[in-house]
Amino acid sequence: MSTLAAPVSSPPEAGALQHVFEQQKARSEALRRETTDPRANRLHKLGAWIADNRTAIQDALYADFRKPATETDVTEVWPSQTELKHTLKHLKKWTALRPVDTPLALMGARGWMQAEPKGVCLIIAPWNYPFYLAIDPLISALAAGNCVIIKPSEMTPAVAALLSRMAREVFDPAEVTVVEGDKEVATELLKLPFDHIFFTGSPQVGKVVMRAAAEHLTSVTLELGGKSPAIVDETADLRDAAEKIVWGKGINAGQTCVAPDYVLVHESVQDKLLMEMRLVVRRFYNPNGQGVAASESFARIVNQHHFERVAGLLEDAQLQGATVAMGGQVDASQHFIEPTVLLNAPTDSRVMQEEIFGPLLPMRTFRTLMEATNEVNTRPRPLALYIFTQNKENQRYLLRNIPAGGAAVNETILQLAHPELPFGGAGNSGIGRAHGYAGFLAFSNEKAVLKQRTGVTGIKSFYPPYTPKVQRMVGWLLRWL
């Protein structure tokens, strides 16, 4: 795989950002009056560009992460294409007027919901899936009829440059513009009165975005993160669970917002699960016995800062008494950290308190489901909950008693890929929903419309003056309707 150098560009000045915003604001008024056909045309052009530039997308992700090309296809290209196809298939249905039932008290009137674009939207994309997590909300925003400014992460410069080229080649800049730069650029953008902000990143930065949005009463979608648990009970198929947990933790070297962040396993099957996980890591990343570091199927930590952060979590856990049951190798020169399972990490250790965002996986045991549930619920609500069981009552118990943004039973990650399932967090792990119809609604204002007939209507019976007759009719209304 070749490397791809991102061109060096000067960050835009505040005046230039204001100009782009005003240009899009003017254009958004025209888009508001469009039919669905121009929206579909933009999405078709985007889809064609992605198909034509698949190799360039692979190269950019390799340059930023040393991410395997096949993994890029599975986690960046394929979900983008899936979202596009799903949106195009349902676009006319989503934009159609949606009639609602009318209560008897309003007989003669009718009502409907009418989706309209919010206007000019800001998408702040993260560094961990820098292509897909810019394109996915872009698809929803365009489907809803908006203009969009995308701010990609400065930590993935090759992908940021690629997104800039995509915007120039596919879109009118008055409709879609990519603005590169660091956090100072993001700060200047957040000063502008956008109609909606879609942010993907950490809860800490999400709070900054929400405070800035509050200045303009701008609506937000915050896709954040947190510590997503995988709970493995004594009835689980342990080989199957091991494969899915290792895959979910191993893709993108654990730098995934919905990666399993720790495992709670029934004490009677911990040793067997560990054995199966060791076998899976060997099959996935070390089939030739040369070590995971030699694997072309395992990505790297994005930069030195994050390498030091994750390596620091590993060191802190060991100093506090955790033992390395698998993995543990690190190489700063490559930003490489081996898939690592930690046993007996104390609950107050950093690796059990912070979102890991790397290939470290603490494992703790439980005796009862209540014990496991209580441990999860002592932390902020996770973005994802993973349950491995063949017992339906255990499944129901855990789904009912552990609040989370989303969940998967006997699987990891794939709830994010299902176009009919809304994706989002709860509390600390996010606000709002994305994907499919939920994503379309996130970038839309659902205008509620009531149309009344002229002349005699039922409600006129309650107009002033409030005579005894009107009072009797109000009493009847309260009793029966």
Image (cartoon, grey):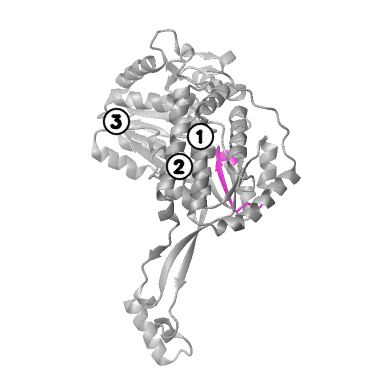
Q: Which mark is residue 306?
A: none
Crowd tier of the residue under label 1, counting other residues whose Cα lies within 10 Å: few below 14, some 14–19, many 20 or above: some
Q: Quadrant of the C terminus?
A: bottom left
The alpha-carbon separation of the residues under discs 3 and 2 comes to 37 Å
Taking the image as shown, residue 292 lies to the left or right of residue 151, namely left
As rendered, which of 376 and 478 lies closer to the eye?
478
The quadrant where residue 158 appears: top right
Residue 433 lies left or right of residue 8; in this view the side is left
Q: Amino acid at mark 1?
A: Ile
| Labels 2 and 1 touching (C-beta < 8 A) | yes
Q: Which residue is mark 2?
A: 84
Amino acid type of the residue that numbered disc 3 sits on in the rendered structure? Asp
The residue beneath circle 1 is 50
Image position, residue 179 (x, y; %): 65, 39
Of tags 3 and 1, the one toward the viewer is 1
- What residue appears at the point 36 percent right and 15 percent down from the top-left corner? 283
Instruction: Give the residue displayed 44% in from the left and 41% down from the top.
Output: 83
Where is residue 329 drawn, in percent x and y?
49, 13
Residue segment shown in magenta: 193-205
Residue under circle 3? 233
Q: Quadrant of residue 389?
A: top left
Packing grade of label 3 (10 A; few <14, some 14-19, many >=20) is: many
Q: Examine the structure image and report whether residue 196 is included in the region drawn in magenta.
A: yes
Q: Secondary structure at mark 1?
A: helix
- Quarter of the figure with residue 469: bottom left
For the residues labelled 2 and 1, the Cα–Cα distance comes to 10 Å
Apparent side of residue 37 relative to residue 183 in the rendered image (left or right): left
Q: Does the stretch in magenta take in 84?
A: no
Q: Sequence order check: which comes first, mark 3 or mark 1?
A: 1
Name the spot of residue 399 as percent of width and height, x first.
33, 42
